[in-house]
Amino acid sequence: IEIGLFEGEKTQCWAFGSELIKGNPDSLRQIPNSYLGPIIKVRKGQKIRVRFKNELPQKSIVHWHGMHVPEEYDGHPKNIISEGQTYVYEYEVMNRAGTYWFHPHPHGKTGEQVYNGLAGMLLVSDGEEENLGLPKDEFDLPVVIQDRSIDTDNQLVYLDGGRMDSMMGFLGDRIFVNGRPEQELSLKAGCNYRLRILNGSNSRIYKLAWHNGEPLKVIGIDGSILERTKTMPYVILAPAKRIDIWLDLKNKKQGEELELKSLEFESGMMGGMMNGGMMGGSNSHLPLGSEYSLFKIKLNKSGSNEYLLPEKLIPYNKLDPTTAINQNNPREFNFFMQGMQWTINGRTWETTDVAEEEIVKINTTEIWQLSNRGGKMMGGGGMMGNGGMMGRGNKGGGMGNMMQMPHPIHIHQVQFNILERDTSEMDINVWNSIREGIIDEGWQDTVLLMPGMKIKIIMRFSDFKGLFVYHCHNLEHEDMGMMRNYKIE
Ligand code: C2O
Ligand code: CU
Ligand code: CU
């Protein structure tokens, strides 16, 4: 499609054109003049059917990020369809109330397809959430944040930095909100809002904060509402992650302005080389970890609404580690670079391949340990070696350090709880620049694994057997092969 995102030239985008065939018209809302897909609203217990017709010039398949669905409806890359073909999804919504989303998942092309416009929000509600009386309709506001690069003809540019960009992850040089380049939302003074923020960027991590130093009030994350509001100076939002923010404009006056920013932080990759240096590629205008504005909120009108922030939200009943079948022996997954490839335990993507350590049993609870400790499993330094042009002098353990980057790790099919983070081998400056923005509560499906970090998560495999994937949600890392199958049998 062509969208008039800018004056003059139209911008070519790919979009989820959508049509409601049967059901409640409120359940499908297109954001006007945006490339983003419709906002789909569903309720736990509801059965939905989605007919996906591929009219792209390349293969694709749609994945429902965060949703607990049978194998055939998960959008596994093996289920890609060609131009002109149709794939029908039909499933019952089993997830808790939360903010989910959908996007394509063809191996090797996910980054390109999402970048060119293919993503949308999927909002799930349930009875528990309804009892809270959270803001609805115009006061329940989806905010999709993405970075894009635009050329002089106002067209989207992907991977113009060449090899390095595709290896590190694409970084655009301007911020889009809800599929629009203008960074401004118009809200009503005197009202309370629920902002559901999705980081729909391919690789960019944000450190969200209000410009005036007011704390963020977080009420939800990924697949859950939190137990109680978490008041935070800033929130680290990795790609694919969602947070629910309570925005209190009761005491604001018409004409006032707010601004959401991304603050400075250290990403821990390769010292100073990344920022605008030789590895900069397209990111040099808006380096990762620099400070910039995301969008402004203008209070153009005033009004009032009756929504109040409840003191208690929804208990999440964290899984008990003693119920895990591998309580003392977590499954280990190491995310690192080997031979100029992003790998998981040294392996890369193969469509249906599954290793022994990637097979789990249905109706069991397991603990997985995810770690980002560079070259420990690699023999010898190679060109990425210690002190070399891309080296980083961390205490990796004698094997030759290599390129380390943050990896937002996502597991299909489940929502998990975070049990612990081991930060003892992290660069302390990196940790200090993000630690107050980390949320370990609730049910999550993606977790940011920073260089040097180890994270233990716990999850239960239930209802559906089959082949599902887990991967880094830096979409360029994923496309390069940092994705593997796991099998529930
Ligand atoms: Cu958001 Cu495997 O996906
Ligand atoms: Cu997913
Ligand atoms: Cu990664």
Image (tube, rainbow, N blue to C red):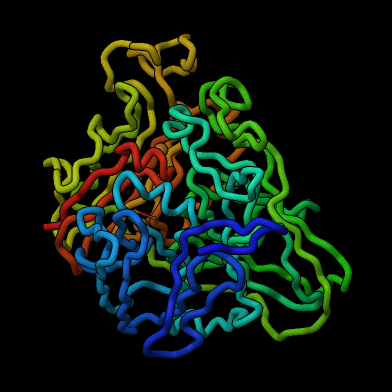
Q: Quadrant of the C terminus?
A: bottom left
Q: Position of residue 350 (x, y in %)?
A: 19, 41
**Which image quadrant shows ligand 1?**
bottom left
Is residue 323 something that shows in the picture? Answer: no
Can I make out residue 354 in this image?
yes
| Residue 342 x, y percent position in the rendering | 34, 32
Residue drawn at x 67%, y 82% as measured from the top left: 307
Task: Say above or below: 193 vs 347.
Answer: below
Q: Is residue 467 above or below residue 87?
A: above
User: 182 or 401: which is nearer to us?
Assistant: 182
> Picture coordinates of residue 321 (x, y %)?
29, 53
Q: In this picture, is 127 found above or below 241?
A: below
Residue drawn at (55%, 63%) of the image: 2
Q: Nearer the viewer, residue 410 or 422?
A: 410
Q: Nearer the viewer, residue 373 or 483?
A: 483
Query: In the drawing, does residue 407 fall left or right of residue 47?
Result: right
Q: Residue at x 61, y 46 (%)?
A: 150
